Image (cartoon, rainbow, N blue to C red):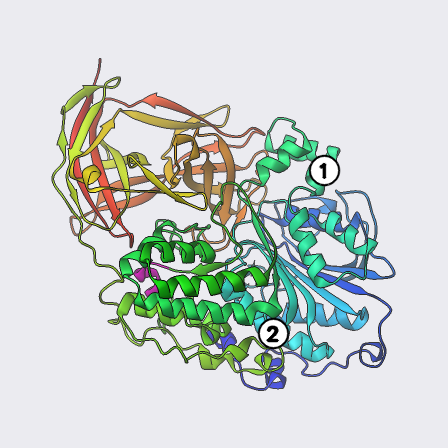
Amino acid sequence: MNSSMCKRVHILLVVAIAMGLAPWRPASAQTNQTTPAREWLVMLYQNADDPILEGDIFTDLNEAEWVGSTAAVTMVSQLDRYDGAFDGDGDWTGTKRFLIEQDRDLTTIGSEELDDLGEIDSGSPEALVDFAVWAMQNYPAKKYALILSDHGAGWVGGWNDDAPKVGSSLTVNEIDQALATILQETEVSQFEFLGFDACLMSEVEVLAGMAPYAHYAVASQETEPALGWAYAKFLGALTTKPTQSGAELASNIVKTYIVNDMMIVDNEARTNYLAALGADAISAKAMAAQMSEDVTLTAVDLSKFTPLMAALNEFAFALTSADPVAVAKARTYAQSFESVFDPQQPSPYIDLGHFAKLAAEFAESDEIDAALKNLQKAYKAAILAEISGSQRPGASGFSIFFPTPELLFSVGTEDSEQSYTAYASRFAGASLWDDFLLFHYTNLDIDPEAVALDLLDPEVGAAADLADYAAPLFVDDGEITTPGVDTDLTMTPLEVSSEEITADETVLLSTQIQGENVGYVYIEVTRYEEETEAYILEDMDFIASDDNEETDGVVYPAWTSDDLDDFLYEWSPTIYSLSDGVDEAFALFEPAVYGEDQEDTEYMVRGIYTFADSQDERYALIHFDGDLNYKYIFGYSDLDGTGAPREITPREGDYFTILEQRYVVDDAGEWIISEQLGDTLTFYGEPFTVTAYEGYPGEYSLGIIVEDLLGNSIAEYTTVYVVEN
C-alpha cells in the first residue's frame, strides 16, 4: 500500500483532490432540495476479484435478486469478478453495475446491467467513492445503506484486488476517508447503515474509523463462512417494511445470518451446495446448526461508540495498576479469532469483553472491577444484536488487537509494512489502548488525558487530520526491553521409561517444570530421516492439565505446582494420514483450540491450495474437530499464511499440497524449522478423511514444550527408538 495514501490533510476538499477525485460533484437537486420518495438505497460494493470468493459473492447478488428493487427500496450492485475460478453466468470478467431486479434464478444474474466498467481496482478508495457517489446521486433516498463484501483483515483492512494492480487493498484509514469524501460530495450527513460482509471487521479499531459516518453497522469478529449474509431474508424484510430504521435492518442481518440463507433454506440450492462439498444431504435446520458453530456477527449502534471508547480508556488505564502477570494471563486465555499475521504465533485478535472479564478476575482489583462494570454497561448499550456459535463461546461482539511484543514491534515502527497507528489512526487518537500496549511491554507512562474522543463525533470527527495520530509507536529499534511479564521457566532434562519400544507399546516421559506463568504445554514428535539428515515433525498436541478452568465457556489449563513438579506424559507412536478417497498422505495435525476433553479440541493441517481452473495458489489451513473430522478450509491472501482469510468452498479438481515441517541444520549449524512442500491430494467431491497408524520404526525425538503467557517457550528432548515387533 502506498504510504502516502495513509496521510490526510485537514480540509476534506483537499482530501478529495489528493485521492484524484473531482472535489465537488454536484449532488442531484432532488437530494438537496426535496425529500426523496424512495425510503432506502442499498448499495452492494462487491469485490469478487479473487478465486476464493468470486462464486460466493456472485451468489450473494443472486440472493439479493430473489427480492429485487421496489418503489421504496432501490438496490444497486457493483460486482468486480475474477478472471478464472468460478465460471458461472458466461464467465465474464471485469466490473459491472446492476440495478438489482427480482429474479428467482440463483445461478444467473437477471438484473438490468447499467454499466460495464472493464477491469478496475476495487482495492482503491477511488473505486469505492466513485460507486457510492454515482449510486447516491442517481438514486437519492431518505436512508442509505452501504455494504462492502470481500476479504476482511481487521484493522489491517482488506478488499484485496491484484488486477489490475498487484497488492492493492483498502486500509481502514482509506475506507474512513473514502466515506468522508462520499458524504461530502453527495451532501448527505450520514449513512443510515454500513455493513462489512467480510471477516474479522468487528474490531473496535475498525468501528472507531466508521463512527463519524454511519448510524448503525454490522460486522463479524470471526471469519465468515462462504455463504456470507442472508441477503434474500433481510432485504425481503426491508422491502416489506421500508420504513424500518437502520437499527432494525442491522438487527435483522444478525438474526437471519446463516439460518435463513438461501443456500440453506432453498431445497435445491442446499442440495447442490452439499453435493459440491461432497457432503451428505441433511435438513436445513441441521445444516444451519453445523454452519453456525464457528460464526459471529454484531449489530452496532455507532452513536454509542464514544461512551464505549471512554469506558475502554478507563479500563485500559485501570489495567496499569494490575499485576502484569494477570493481564498476560487474560490475553493468553481470552477467546481469540483467526489471525492475519504470522501463522506460527498466537492470534492477536482477541475478544475485548472476554479479555476484560478475565483480566478483572485474575487481577482482583476494586479499581479494575469498577472499570469493568462501566465497560460492560457501555458494551450493552452499543450492541443492538449479537450472535456467536458454540465454538466461539467467549465472543461478546467486539475484538481488539493485543499482540505479543514481537508482533507489536513489527507493526509499530516507521518502517513497518503494516502500521497499527497509520492504518487505524482514528482509533489511535481516540483511545488509550495503544498507550496501554506500550505501558504493558515497555513500562512507558500513560497520560489518561491524551485522547481525542471528538474524533468519533459526526460533526467534527470527519474533518480531523488523521496524520496527526499516525505516528509510529516506536521511535527506534531498542524500545522493547522487558515484556509485561518476565519469563522465568526452567525444566529438568527429560527422563524416559524406556529408550526402545515397539509400535504397539508406550513410553513414559517425566520432568520437573518450574515457573508461575505457565500457559500451554505441548508434546512434539519428530522422526529422523537418514536420507535428508532432517527430523520430520510428525505429531504435536496439547498436554492437558489435570484440572481446567473455564470463563464464559472458554476452557484453559489450570496448572498446579504438583502438576509441574512431577510432570508425566505417556506417549504411543502414532502418525496420521489424510485421504482424498484415491490417494493418501501423512500430515501434521497441529493443535488449534484447547478443549475440556479430546472431542472439544480442534486441529489444523497447513498446505497450499491450488484452484484447478486458474492454477492460482493460496496458503491454506484445513480445520478438523477433536475426532479429526473435516470442518472447513481457509485460504489466505498471501502465500506465507498472512493476510485476509476466507473460507474456501472446494471445487472438484482443486488440490491441496501438504506443507511438511522439518528440523534442518542452517548455515550457522543451528537446528531450525523449515516448511517444505509435501504430497498433494485432490478434491473429488468428498471431504478428506483421516486415519491413524502406528508409527514407523526408527529414531524419534520426543519433546515437551512449555509456553509461558507471552508465547515464550522452553523445551527438553529425548530420543526413543521404535523397533519392529
Nearest to the observer: residue 314 or residue 473: 314
Image vertical order of residue 24 relative to residue 108, above or below: below
Q: Report if residue 723 is visible in the image.
A: yes
What x and y, as percent, mark residue 127?
A: 65, 68
Say whether residue 408 is magenta: yes
Q: Which residue is mark 2?
A: 212
Say whether residue 381 is magenta: no
Question: Label 2 to label 1, Cα distance in Å?
Answer: 37 Å
Name the chief secondary structure element in magenta: helix
What x and y, as percent, mark residue 340?
A: 45, 55
Which residue appears at 69% of the width and 49% of the height?
60
Among numbered discs 2 and 1, the one appearing first in the sequence: 2
Residue 215 picture quarter: bottom right
Which residue appears at 46% of the width and 44% of the height?
620
- Quadrant of the rendering where the C terminus is positioned: top left
Q: Is residue 166 left or right of residue 402?
A: right
Q: Is residue 587 left or right of residue 300?
A: left
Image vertical order of residue 443 relative to residue 252, above or below: below
CB under 8 Å between callouts 2 and 1?
no
Image vertical order of residue 88 relative to residue 443, above or below: above
Which residue appears at 41% of the width and 72% of the height?
432
Q: Which residue is mark 1?
A: 265
Q: Is residue 71 left or right of residue 686?
A: right
Residue 415 picture quarter: bottom left
Amino acid residing under circle 1? Val
Read off the magenta span. 403-409
What x and y, as percent, mark residue 616?
A: 53, 47
